[in-house]
Image (cartoon, rainbow, N blue to C red):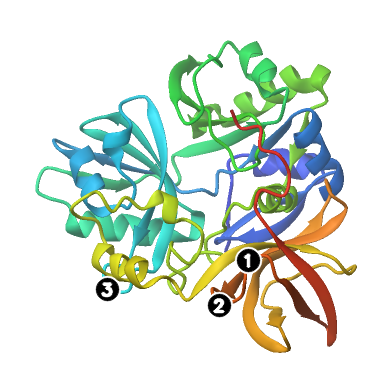
Amino acid sequence: MADLLTSPLHDRHVALGAKFGEFGGWSMPLEYSGVVAEHTAVRTAVGLFDVSHLGKATVIGPGAAAYVNSVLTNDLARIGPGQAQYTLICDDATGGVVDDLIQYYRADDDIFLIPNAGNTTEVVRRLAEAAPEGIAVTNRHRDYVVLAVQGPKSSEVVEALGFPTDHEYMSFAVAAYEGAEVIICRTGYSGERGFELVAPNDVAQQLWDAILDAGADHGILPIGLGARDTLRTEMGYPLHGQDISPTINPLEGGAGWAVSFKKPAFWGRDVLLAVKEAGPKRTLRAIKQIDRAIPRGHMSVLHNGEVVGEVTSGTFSPSLKQGIGLALISTEVPADATVTLDVRGKQAAFEQVKAPFVESHVR
């Protein structure tokens, strides 16, 4: 993994005994104390994630918000300065998802974007090439760390650092830390109450240490990407490259709620409108084991002996102690029908359920 990028906190993770893996071109911690222990800490107490592999980009200049709103799927007019929004960048010709991202509405002339790690360069390229004169789109991927504090005790930990915690879900505040500006956003990928802190690299290590110190009395654990995946799967949150992708459009991948057809324009609008009017031929559905089995990506989904879809995400749920997953399934299959998975040549029954698999506590 010599050619992989590393977080400014890499040495901290090594000292904590983390096991590393490649993700989006980065070497990132997969686990420290074990996926189940880390998952449980987030569900019951609090956990700290280094997700600095996530991209960062700025769109700055007169009319920046209006420009972003003309190309991305969700409607920035629904929010205002100080708020954040989940959105998608789609290919104009195919409607496929180039990336899903969070947009921070700082001002009409200042939008901050958090794309996925491996897609940041492409997102910036597309936005920069189409940007009107006077609007600068800049890749800031290596300039900031992103630390996620997630769990029922997250407010106590963040408050102990002197940061505000009373802002609403999907809104953010800005505070000073060691002379640097830190964005504190009420977002996360765990399904629990939480915050994501975006800070310049030069305060990364101090901030990481301070969060662990502040959380010591609350049972805080450092959390790797292994538990991040089990947590997000329990919530039915899509992962780009698996549940949504350039070949899986948002109406198929369960992200249609983030597509605003009321807007006159965004990339992929015409294609996606045609899909909406005709009805997608496949859709992302949540599945839960009946027979004892753990679904894994690319397993075939069968109904009445015929292949009707494919698992896109699958795992063992530490909360439910069951196999759960997400699968792209033909819309011709009734949503309440039992399906079977081909698990290493054996048929295992699964029920289709409504996500999330466990109750959300994000608000």
Q: CA distance from mark 3 to mark 2?
A: 26 Å
**Which of the two marks, 3 or 2, is nearer to us in this view?**
2
Kindly identify which residue carries mark 3: 93
Q: At label 2, which amino acid type do we have? A: Glu
The residue drawn where x is 57% and y is 58% is: 239
**Mark 1 or 3, nearer chain start:** 3
Which disc, if any, is residue 335? Answer: 1
Residue 332 is marked as: 2
Nearer the observer: mark 1 or 3; the answer is: 1
Binning the other alpha carbons within 10 Å of mark 1 as few (below 14), some (14 to 19) or many (20 upward) gives some
> For this rendering, which residue is in front, 327 or 334?
334
Amino acid type, callout 3: Ala
Q: Earlier in the sequence, mark 3 or mark 2?
A: 3
User: In the picture provided, is 218 more to the left or to the right than 312?
Assistant: right
Q: Nearer the viewer, residue 189 or 138?
A: 189
Mark 2: few/some/many CA within 10 Å (<14, 14-19, 20+): few
Look at 53% across and 68% down and name the residue there. 283
Please name the residue shown 82% across and 17% down the image.
217
Total residue callouts: 3
> In which quadrant is the N terminus drawn?
bottom right
The residue shown at (61%, 25%) is 207
- Residue projecting furthest to the left: 133
Image coordinates for residue 285, horizontal then vertical, percent: 61, 63
Horizontal side of residue 80 vs 342, given as left or right: left
Asked if the residues shown at circle 1 and circle 3 are in contact, with their CB atoms under 8 angstroms apart, the answer is no
